């Protein structure tokens, strides 16, 4: 599955590295990437095109936990309905808290 | 003052009681400032000991553990302890010296890129390139370590930054921690599932104790009267002898616990992450069950198995909202009957000391003001299975990382946190050697920790796996060339005793508990004693092997 992530990072030491580390660890590869510092130099906007077999919702959650990440948005190429969990399966999520 | 003095001040402002560390070149200004510190520095004999002692302190006290090391090898020696804290969500701040800023990136003497080395095993890491960075990073490191799902934070401080003269900044109170309220729609959906369920099981993890939600959890259990299984880290969230406690689940889980989970139609997973040692083969795990998953970390919800209902938020709030009696009398009694039927038989006939029985007797004799700090291996599983804990902080164990060498340093941290407790290390002859040097720390500070060494002259757990899954081809597990442990202990100033016969079990326990200072009880056991039950790797938790109880 291919997935786009749009992240807004606080521009601090190691931020981009941490994002790429989480992407790798959680089972995705980078196909394309662009990063731009904002005019004030305090934020870095990162766009990633990724591919991987794992659940992209979880990747988004893992990225969102990073201290340097202010915001993550995700767009999948597959219709949202068919986004299934990898190996693990079973019931659909009825309510998310 | 120097920035190094600010480091000490900032630790005082965080009410730090103990810092576990080891000095060296790049952290010398901080060590100089420590001379004036209001808190105590505990000199360990290996930096891994510092990180693991900080971990044990944090688990026993509920506060942030702090460790300190120099750059390069000092810092890399902390790594195992940091990873250990990360896997088990233990709040920790690790402070490392770094080479001066103008040397950074030049492969200078004792330069290691600690930000890079630790990136995937910390909640966050800071590098203070200026003293002004330190002013906000230090309090922030503590806040991050303890907030939400706790974890370790690294703060790397170059030597020139430590030496810079500064004006002491004013103290800024930390922002209040927001309480994450559970979503009411999710709670309503969870209540509906609970009401519809006929065979529910509570799956209790380490998050319950860490979230200070023990009272709400126990009220939830009493109100619903749903049988409980615990993870390794969830042990103690409900008393071991509580009627509804079916015991630990998983690879070395108890039969009654594993079978109840496999048959259940609803699992209420609380502060747990469905670790593979607990679930066995995931797609055969609790095949009929829907999940209600409660946790503070949104990334755990649906990570491994989709919950029917995910409730993110503070566990006390969530559990209080879910409290209601439900009608499951038949199911409950089925679980409890199986628990009674599969109760452990301690009547092993051999003349050897039988480790499960010894631990059971210790548990009966030691009382509730006791902390057991385990190493890793068979002995760790026997503790989890046979010792009766009443609070999670009493059971210190390296769950996620499985760090041999954890027991002794963690016990040092735990005793400093709770000096009114009896702290007992339960170790194996492999594990004890991994941080044996910390016996010197006991002696140095007069720490009256007791060590119970279960010596099977093997790397027992690995031996057991080779026996079962590698056709008895024993490879590098024989430790019959171990030193005379009592002599080793005595040379560190720790009294000791060796026993090997079953009729010495009581006497040995009395000697251990009655010793005034630290004590080393060397117990020789039969190398062929295995841990049962055992779920083979890649198998369902329903497929437990149960060998002979010898
Ligand atoms: C640092 C580290 N190295 C290796 C292992 C793999 N390992 C797990 S249990 C074990 C054997 C432990 O032996 P011992 O401490 O004597 O305990 P026993 O199983 O005999 O009770 C080993 C080598 C580990 N968990 N940690």
Image: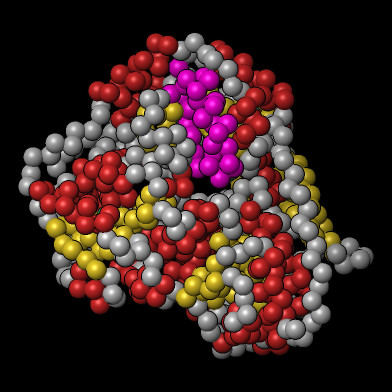
Report the number of numbered marks: 0
Left or right: residue B468 versus residue B155 is left
Of the four image quadrants, the one with ligand 1 is bottom left
Residue at image x 52%, y 19%?
B224
Residue B5 part of the magenta segment: no
Residues B400 and B288: in front is B400
Asked whether residue B476 appears in the rendered view, the answer is no
Query: In the rendered view, would you say B405 is above or below B68?
Result: above
Quadrant position of the C terminus of chain B in the picture: top left
Range of the magenta residues?
B199-227
Q: Position of residue B352 (x, y in %)?
A: 10, 49
Query: In the rendered view, would you say B496 is above or below B382?
Result: below
Q: Residue furthest right?
A: A39
Left or right: residue A22 versus residue A90 is right
Residue at image x 55%, y 51%?
B62
Asked whether residue B131 appears in the rendered view, the answer is yes
Residue at image x 69%, y 32%?
B182
Q: Position of residue B353 (x, y in %)?
A: 14, 49
Residue at image x 63%, y 57%?
B145
């Amino acid at each position: 599955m291919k997935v786009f992530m749009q992240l807004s990072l606080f521009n601090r030491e190691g931020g981009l590295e941490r994002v790429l580390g989480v992407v790798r660890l959680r089972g995705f590869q980078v196909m394309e990437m662009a990063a731009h510092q904002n005019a004030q130099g305090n934020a870095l906007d990162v766009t990633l095109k990724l591919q991987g077999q794992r659940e992209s919702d979880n990747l988004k959650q893992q990225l969102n936990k990073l201290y340097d990440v202010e915001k993550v948005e995700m767009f999948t190429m597959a219709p949202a309905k068919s986004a299934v969990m990898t190996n693990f399966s079973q019931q659909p999520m009825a309510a998310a808290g | 003052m120097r920035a190094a003095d600010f480091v000490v001040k900032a630790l005082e402002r965080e009410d730090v009681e103990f810092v576990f560390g080891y000095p060296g070149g790049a952290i010398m200004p901080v060590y100089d400032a420590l001379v004036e510190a209001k808190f105590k520095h505990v000199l360990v004999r290996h930096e891994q000991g510092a990180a693991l002692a900080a971990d044990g302190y944090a688990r026993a006290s509920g506060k942030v553990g702090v460790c300190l090391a120099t750059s390069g090898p000092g810092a890399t020696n902390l790594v195992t302890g940091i990873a250990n804290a990360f896997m088990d969500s233990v709040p920790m701040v690790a402070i490392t010296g770094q080479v001066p800023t103008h040397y950074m990136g030049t492969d200078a003497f004792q330069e290691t890129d600690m930000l890079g080395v630790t990136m995937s095993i910390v909640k966050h890491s800071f590098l203070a390139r200026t003293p002004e960075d330190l002013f906000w990073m230090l309090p922030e490191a503590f806040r991050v370590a303890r907030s939400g799902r706790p974890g370790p934070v690294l703060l790397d401080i170059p030597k020139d930054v430590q030496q810079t003269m500064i004006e002491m900044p004013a103290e800024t109170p930390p922002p209040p921690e927001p309480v994450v309220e559970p979503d009411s729609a999710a709670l309503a959906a969870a209540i509906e599932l609970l009401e519809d369920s006929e065979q529910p099981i509570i799956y209790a993890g380490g998050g319950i104790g860490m979230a200070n939600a023990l009272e709400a959890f126990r009220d939830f259990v009493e109100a619903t009267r749903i049988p409980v299984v615990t993870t390794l880290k969830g042990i103690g969230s409900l008393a071991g002898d509580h009627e509804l406690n079916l015991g630990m689940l998983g690879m070395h889980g108890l039969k009654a616990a594993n079978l109840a989970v496999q048959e259940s139609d609803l699992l209420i997973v609380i502060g747990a992450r469905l670790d593979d040692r607990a679930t066995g083969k995931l797609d055969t795990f609790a095949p009929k069950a829907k999940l209600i998953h409660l946790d503070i970390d949104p990334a755990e919800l649906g990570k491994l198995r989709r919950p029917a209902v995910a409730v993110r938020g503070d566990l006390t709030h969530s559990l209080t909202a879910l409290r209601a009696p439900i009608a499951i009398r038949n199911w409950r009694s089925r679980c409890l009957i199986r628990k009674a039927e599969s109760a452990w038989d301690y009547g092993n006939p051999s003349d050897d000391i039988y480790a499960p029985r010894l631990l059971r007797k210790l548990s009966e004799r030691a009382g509730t003001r006791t902390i057991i700090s385990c190493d890793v291996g068979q002995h760790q599983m026997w503790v989890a299975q046979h010792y009766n804990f009443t609070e999670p902080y009493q059971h210190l164990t390296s769950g996620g990382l499985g760090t041999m060498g954890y027991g002794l340093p963690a016990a040092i941290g735990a005793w400093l946190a709770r000096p009114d407790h009896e702290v007992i290390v339960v170790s194996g002859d492999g594990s004890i050697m991994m941080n044996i040097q910390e016996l010197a720390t006991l002696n140095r500070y007069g720490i009256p920790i007791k060590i119970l060494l279960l010596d099977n002259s093997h790397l027992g757990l690995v031996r057991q796996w080779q026996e079962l899954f590698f056709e008895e081809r024993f490879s590098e597990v024989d430790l019959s060339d171990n030193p005379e442990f009592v002599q080793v202990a005595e040379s560190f100033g720790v009294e000791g005793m060796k026993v090997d016969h079953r009729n010495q079990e009581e006497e040995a326990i009395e000697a251990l508990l009655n010793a005034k200072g630290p004590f080393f009880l060397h117990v020789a056991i039969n190398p062929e004693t295995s841990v049962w039950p055992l779920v083979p790797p890649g198998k369902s938790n329903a497929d437990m092997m149960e060998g002979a109880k010898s």
